[in-house]
Amino acid sequence: MKTAVILGLALPLLAVSRPAGGADKPAKLVDALLRGIGSEREPGAAVMVLKDGEVIYLGTRGVADLQAMRPIDGRTNFRLASLTKQFTAAAVMLLVRDGKLHYEDRLTDLLPDFPDYGRAITVRHLLDHTSGLPDYEDSMPSADPSKPAEDSQIDDAGVLDLLKRQNAGWFVPGSLWRYSNSGYVLLGLIVAKASGSSFPSFLRERIFVPLKMRGTVAFVRGGNSVADRAFGYTKDGGRWRFTDQSPTSATLGDGGVYSSLYNLSLWDEALRRRILLTEAEMKPALTPVRVPGKGPTGPDGKPAEYGFGWFLDPWKGRARMWHYGETIGFRTAIQRFTADGLTVIVLCNRADVDATALALKIAGFYLAGGK
């Protein structure tokens, strides 16, 4: 296992510190958790802990690629899955600031050929998962198991086509909450249309390049590449199976970004210091949605709170903004305890790790001071 309380790593915008004395105890506890994930020759995980903008822990375990046996490190780029949604939401907020979008713009105004059931759906509904859009995965044709997953993948345009074939949504927009990948795929398309740039290009030009997040991309097969890429795996019958792509792995706004611990530390610093969006501009994203019917639920099915691309419910009384990502072969999580100045990031290229539970356990070590 490669573990560090890092010294000498050049992190623009971030200070680097070494815990002293008894403060080393949380790091040792996290080391033990990483060792428990698996061997150094298996798919694994990468963990970073930041405190008030300083990296106080970085540890990795395992390999990014079972063929090349390339070890995971702080610059390995993992598929973020639904951690992508915070970038999609930020792209929309930047366009709102530019005056090119408004939260109350209606779906049928932005995509005029969308069916009439989209007339009551606004950008805000898409952002906070209250649109009632059908789940595009329910309407996809069955994949041919004898062919590679890439041969049956659906892209954003394909999702839009499936949604256009529906006659109605699941519920009246704004009346209930239901997590919607469909909504975030459409937000990616809306960003592209409103900006006049492709969604990957907009993210690169307005978020990744300004923050120096080199290597972070919204991946399009045949259109760009992922440097230092981690590939996804699933353990099946005691053996590792390559499960890097699925029929839904080509969509963008809901889960298509790849990034590393290093680059996510830059993203965390941008959020902490309000580098891209001011406090006032971020306020809508950090305001929990309220609906008359059933409200947000977390991945465990318990009541939660949600804004734009972020869950917002506290943990053990501590304010936080957080999200998880799950897709074939990958599990990811980010937990930002805003009042405590603590952030925990977990990226895994194996499907048998509960990244959210791992991130919270690690957060508990540091919030408790190692006791």
Image: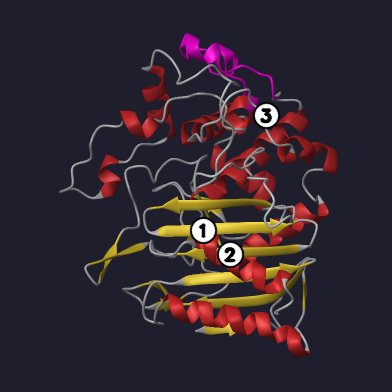
Q: How many marks?
A: 3
- Alpha-carbon distance for marks 1 and 3? 27 Å
234 or 176, which lies in front?
176
Q: Secondary structure at mark 3?
A: loop
Q: Are the residues tagged 1 and 2 within 8 Å (C-beta)?
A: no
Tell me if 255 is positioned left or right of 109 in this view.
left
Q: Secondary structure at mark 2?
A: helix
Residue bearing the label numbered 2? 359
Q: Is residue 353 magenta?
A: no
Residue 251 in picture, x, y percent from top left: 43, 40
Residue extending furthest toward the top = 116
Q: Secondary structure at mark 1?
A: strand
Residue 111 in picture, x, y percent from top left: 53, 18
Q: Residue at x 70, y 86 (%)?
A: 24
Tell me if 315 is positioned left or right of 188 in this view.
right
Q: Is residue 119 magenta?
A: yes
Of circles 1 and 3, which is in front?
3
Coloring basis for residues: secondary structure
190 or 369, which lies in front?
369
What's the mark number on residue 290? 3
Q: Residue at x 29, y 63 (%)?
A: 242
Residue bearing the label numbered 1? 332
Tell me if 108 is positioned left or right of 340 in this view.
left
Tell me which label, 1 or 3, sits earlier in the chain. 3
Residue 101 in picture, x, y percent from top left: 69, 25
Q: Amino acid at mark 3?
A: Arg
Q: Amino acid at mark 1?
A: Thr
Tell me if 355 is positioned left or right of 39 in this view.
right
Query: Magenta part of the protein: which range?
Result: 103-124
Any part of residue 77 in sight: no
- Alpha-carbon distance for marks 2 and 3? 27 Å
Number of other residues with Cα within 10 Å of mark 2, as a class: few under 14, some 14 to 19, many 20 or more: many
